[in-house]
Image (cartoon, rainbow, N blue to C red):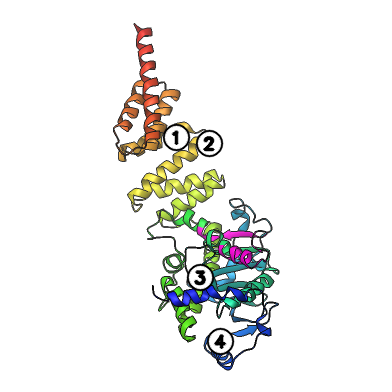
């Protein structure tokens, strides 16, 4: 129930929607609060058709390091490769792209959740600029959205981390609530979470959160960072006491998110353009999946093989890697090679259902070895964890194999 009063007060201020803040009288304490905000957060108020909004702007040189990479290197990210995986990125130009990230009053989404801080980042001729748009309270939201629309007008594409599913959807909802057209649907959007999961899902990382990748992959751990779960409460505290000091940590957290995305793009570029394979077998497995999706068969096979022969690969990743490689080989009609992988998988992981079913199919149709196929299927039926749908599929296959074996015996006799 903490800060419930502040949350209710935030919701009650919807009557200010669409009115110009500049037309309203500003009491002295409000002016004092605004001056303190500017001083503490080192921001400036910018004019918009919907009123003034606080913007905290910082400039970074292109040679600025963020962990193992420099910001400039993200300009060389091979977008032409990523375009083949994700639609809507045609004509992607990093110099006309807007990085964005939000800090919100909660993670539930819907009309009751607000983005009280929107962080932006973009390249200019001499460097990289971050801008963070901060609401003083809910009546600032029309101005925040107006400023964001103006910034989006000069960009063609977007980069975020989980922004396609969350941030863009939330902001689109807020635009609709204020009867403004949403500027997100008409722009290509590269969500770095998706490609990160493709590459690091089977790694030794505890998760694929941006902060985890920043610390463990980019080599830029955060020190004295404000935890994400604390950020909504810090904003609600500000609504109550108007003390902006704790918001400095929120601003810094959001700025680091923007810089981490730029650095991640730089690292992805180095990774995908390198002529040498990484030493980590788990990352090799992720890259094998990436190149498989692009139908770069030789490179994918080389990476699958390199990952699977490495003793450092954990068992879960090894089992999954063999199945993924077998799928690719089957897709290419190289079923004999896929069958070797299914056999190898079952020799080490006898409960693997996909290998059981696929090898049984191959034995039945490719080798007409009905007895071995039936043995595999009956073994799969002993697994009590299989779903009812899979059980019906296996029982149907077992029945057909028994009939074929019976017919074969009758012909032989």
Q: Which mark is residue 332?
A: 2
Q: Which mark is residue 42?
A: 4
Which quadrant holds the N terminus?
Answer: bottom left
Neighbourhood count class around disc 2 (C-alpha, 10 Å): few under 14, some 14–19, many 20 upward: few
3D distance between C-alphas at marks 1 and 4? 62 Å
3D distance between C-alphas at marks 2 and 1? 10 Å
- Of the image marks 3 and 2, the number of the one nearer the N terminus: 3
3D distance between C-alphas at marks 1 and 3? 50 Å
Give how far across and how far down residue 149 sits, in percent. 67, 70
Q: Is residue 354 above or below residue 87?
A: above
Query: Can you tell which of label 3 and label 2 is closer to the viewer?
Result: 3
Q: Which mark is residue 104?
A: 3
- Of the image marks 4 and 3, the number of the one nearer the N terminus: 4
Query: Can you tell which of label 4 and label 2 is closer to the viewer?
Result: 4
Classify residue 351 as left or right of residue 69.
Answer: left
The answer to whether residue 370 is visible is: yes
Return the residue at label 1.
337
The answer to whether residue 245 is visible is: no
Query: Can you tell which of label 4 and label 3 is closer to the viewer?
Result: 3
Residue drawn at (37%, 50%) of the image: 310
3D distance between C-alphas at marks 4 and 2? 58 Å
> What's drawn in magenta, residue-wise?
170-193
- Of the image marks 2 and 1, the number of the one nearer the N terminus: 2
Residue 319 forms part of the magenta stretch:
no
Whether pointer 1 and pointer 4 mark residues with C-beta atoms closer than 8 Å, the reply is no
- Of the image marks 1 and 4, the number of the one nearer the N terminus: 4
């Amino acid at each position: 129930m903490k800060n419930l009063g502040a949350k209710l007060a935030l919701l009650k201020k919807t009557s200010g929607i669409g009115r110009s803040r500049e037309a309203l009288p500003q009491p002295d304490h409000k002016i004092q609060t605004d001056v303190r905000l500017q001083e503490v957060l080192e921001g400036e108020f910018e004019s918009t058709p919907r009123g003034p909004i606080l913007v905290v702007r910082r400039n970074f040189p292109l040679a600025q390091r963020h962990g193992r990479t420099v910001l400039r290197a993200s300009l060389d990210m091979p977008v032409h490769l990523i375009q083949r995986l994700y639609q809507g990125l045609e004509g992607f130009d990093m110099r006309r792209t807007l990085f964005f990230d939000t800090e919100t009053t909660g993670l539930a989404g819907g009309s009751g959740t607000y983005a009280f801080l929107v962080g932006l980042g973009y390249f200019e001729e001499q460097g990289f600029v971050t801008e963070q748009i901060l609401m003083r309270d809910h009546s600032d939201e029309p101005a925040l959205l107006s400023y964001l629309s103006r910034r989006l007008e000069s960009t063609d594409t977007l980069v975020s981390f989980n922004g396609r599913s969350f941030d863009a959807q939330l902001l689109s909802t807020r635009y609709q609530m204020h009867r403004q057209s949403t500027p997100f649907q008409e722009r290509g959007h590269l969500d770095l979470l998706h490609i990160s999961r493709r590459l690091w899902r089977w790694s030794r990382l505890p998760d694929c959160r941006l902060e985890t990748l920043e610390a463990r992959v980019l080599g830029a751990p955060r020190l004295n960072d404000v935890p994400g779960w604390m950020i909504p409460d810090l904003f609600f505290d500000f609504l109550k006491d108007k003390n902006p000091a704790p918001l400095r940590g929120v601003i810094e957290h959001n700025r680091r998110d923007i810089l981490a995305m730029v650095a991640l793009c730089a690292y992805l570029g180095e990774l995908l353009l390198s002529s040498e394979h990484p030493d980590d077998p788990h990352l090799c497995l992720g890259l094998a999946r990436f190149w498989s999706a692009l139908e770069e068969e030789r490179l994918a096979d080389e990476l699958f093989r390199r990952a699977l022969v490495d003793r450092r690969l954990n068992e879960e990743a090894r089992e999954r890697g063999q199945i993924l490689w077998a799928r690719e080989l089957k897709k290419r009609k190289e079923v004999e090679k896929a069958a070797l992988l299914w056999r190898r998988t079952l020799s080490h992981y006898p409960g693997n259902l996909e290998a059981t079913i696929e090898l049984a199919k191959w034995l039945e149709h490719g080798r007409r070895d009905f007895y071995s196929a039936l043995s595999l299927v009956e073994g799969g039926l002993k697994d009590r964890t299989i779903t009812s749908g899979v059980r019906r599929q296996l029982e149907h296959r077992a029945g057909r194999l028994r009939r074929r074996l019976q017919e074969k015996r009758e012909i032989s006799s």
